[in-house]
Image (spheres, helix red, strand yellow):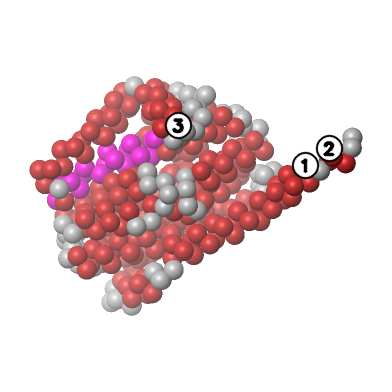
Amino acid sequence: MTAADLAPAAPRGLVRRAVPVLFPLAVATGIGFALHDRIGDLADLVVRPGAVPYLLGALAANAGAVLLSMVTWRTLLGDLGPKVPGAAATRIFFTSFLSKYLPGAVWGVLAQVRMGRAVGVPGPVMVAVFLLNLMAAVLTGLTIGPVAAPWTLGGDAWWLLLPAAVTVACAVRPGLINSLAALGARLTRRPAPTAAASDGGMRRAMASAAASWAVSGLHLWALAVMLGAPAAKALPVCVGGFALATAAASLVVFLPDGWGAREAVLMLALSAVLPWQAAAAAAVASRVVCTLSEVLVGGTALLVTRVSGRPTAAS
């Protein structure tokens, strides 16, 4: 073997060693961007009389939703691929999950493919898990969204029933989601998934995704009630509005975690139960609460898997 043969290997090895260091730094920068100039807004809410229980409840609700979203992903991983140890699966999920704070949607799937291969899951299977998980989340989110429509869009909300009809069709024939994932891959110029989920696996994933949306909406409800919204009327508005806003914003792939797009939809929904100024405050507080809870849950999970001595080989 000549020196020329060895030359290309050096840069590749350098990149492999640099990625585990640079990737967390990039994610931390993205999280800092999401929180910058927002902590002060949250501090203003904390000092409101009686606000702390609502804020803690909001944090707990979104933390529970994050864990349910991991259940969705692990359901699909277990259905499509070889068995992966719990610690390794947790590390893969949360590394990919926190990468949403980077611009572009490619980082999550790249993290899953790289770390999945390290524990014996083929790259095409990880791509399929990523796409099917995304489809399950978006479809169920757009389906729960119409719950808020009567208060926000009135008679113009009929078009929101279209994604609900698609979701019902996919629940009856889950194989349709595999086809939709293949179509989405073509539209985004990504390789089509070569693995398909079983009907039972897809239904279980959709059920846990819907549960995740329902629980996550409770954090917005707590914030809205704290700011003076009527509790009974605000519940469907907040659950449906948050699901619709987040699912729609997830399609805006060039913004980290749909930054800005989600707030615009949230303010429109919340204006049905709050004045515009309070709706804006709730939307901003929602961003901060979600970011903090996601970082706390994800960071704790990654720390526990590392301390336990069972991280993935990719780490």
Q: Secondary structure at mark 2?
A: helix
Left or right of 123: which side holds 268? left
Label 3 to label 2: alpha-carbon separation: 36 Å
Task: Assess whether residue 225 is covered by the magenta stretch.
Answer: no
* Camera-side residue of 37 and 115: 37
* Secondary-structure class at tag 1: loop
* Magenta stretch encompasses residue 149: yes
Disc number at residue 185? Answer: 3
Quarter of the image that includes the N terminus:
top right
Q: Is residue 148 left or right of residue 33?
A: left
Residue furthest out toward the front:
4
Q: Earlier in the sequence, mark 3 or mark 2?
A: 2
Does residue 169 appear in the picture of this structure?
A: yes
Relative to 183, does residue 219 appear above or below in the rendering?
A: below
* 47 w.r.t. 221: above or below: below
Q: Could you tell me the amino acid type at mark 3? A: Ala
Q: Label 1 amino acid?
A: Pro
Residue at numbered disc 2? 5
Residue labelled with disc 1: 8
